[in-house]
Image: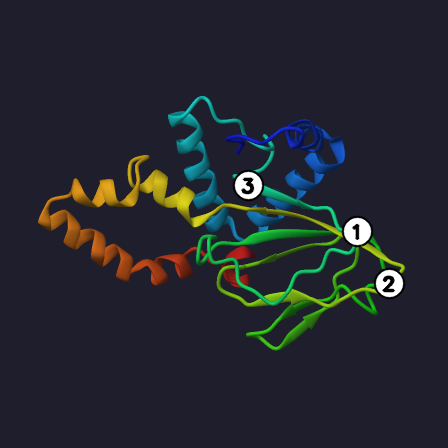
Amino acid sequence: MVLRHDSPDEEILSGLLKHPSFVRMAGHASGIFGTWAPKMHAYYADHLHRLMDHDKTLTRNFENSIFSACAFNFGPQTVCYRHRDHANLPFGWCGITALGNYDYKLGGHLILWDLGLVIEFPPGSTIFIPSAALEHSNASIQKHERRYSFTQYTSGGTFRWVDYGFQKADVYLVSLSEEGRQAAAQEGRDRLAFGLSLFSTLDELQ
C-alpha cells in the first residue's frame, strides 16, 4: 500500500514493485500464507479490501498479495540484529524471502531466540514468522558473500484503523458510549485468544 515516497526513491521503488521477479515473489509468499494459515490470510485480506474500498487514493503494492506493506533490504550483507517487530500485528505473520549468494550452511541462519532454534535459510527461500511475538535475528555471512531480503507484512495500526472506522484510536474511543467503551476494553482482553484462533493446526489443513 503506497501513501508517499520521497524522490528519488519513488522511481526506484516503483520499478521494484513492478518488476516481474518481485511480483512473483510477492504472490508466492501470499499463496504460502493462504495455504498454511487460511484463517489468518482471510483476516488480512478482509482488512486490506475494506481499506482499499474506503480510500480510492491508495495503491496496492502487489495485486496478487494481501499484505499492505513490504521492505526491500538492499544489503549488500543484509542481516538483522536481535529484535521484535513491535509495530506489526501482535499475532500476525511476516513473510521473509532471502536473496543473494551465500553459503547457507555457514551463515544467514534465522535465529528464533524464544524457541531456541537456529534455522538454515538458503537464498530463494521464504519463511513466515509471527515477527512481533518472536525475538529473531540472522547469523552473519562471510565477508565475500552477498545477502539481501524482501519482506511483506501489515502493521498493527492498519488493522486498528480499519476496525475503528478509519479513524485514530483516541477519536474512536471518545465517540463510544460507556457501554461501548466497556465492550472495547473486553475485546482488548480477548485479543490474544482471538489471535490464536486464527492459527491453523495440521489436522485442520488436511
Residue on which the image places disc 3: 69
Q: Are marks 3 and 2 in contact (CB under 8 Å)?
A: no
Residue 47 coordinates in the image, percent (x, y):
41, 39
Q: How is the image coloured?
A: rainbow
Q: In the rendered structure, which disc, 1 or 3, sits on the residue that comes first in sequence? A: 3
126 up-or-down from 162: above or below = below
**Which element is circle 2 on?**
loop
Q: In the rendered structure, which disc, 1 or 2, sits on the residue that comes first in sequence? A: 1
Q: Nearer the viewer, residue 9 or 175?
A: 9
Residue on which the image places disc 1: 76
Disc count in the image? 3
Residue lying at the far left in this picture: please name it.
178
**Left or right: 122 as drawn, with respect to 26:** right
Residue 55 coordinates in the image, percent (x, y):
41, 25
Residue lying at the far bottom in this picture: please name it.
116
Residue on which the image places disc 2: 143
Residue lying at the far top in this picture: please name it.
56
Q: Nearer the viewer, residue 118 or 27?
A: 118
**Which element is circle 3 on?**
strand
Circle 1: is it few (<14), some (14-19), or many (20+) Cα within 10 Å? few
- The residues bearing labels 3 and 2 have C-alpha atoms spaced at a distance of 31 Å
| Among the 4 quarters of the image, the one containing residue 113 | bottom right
Give amino acid for label 3: Ala
Q: Could you tell me which residue is drawn at 60 percent across and 67 percent down?
A: 82
Give the label, 3 or 2, closer to the camera.
2
Circle 3: is it few (<14), some (14-19), or many (20+) Cα within 10 Å? some
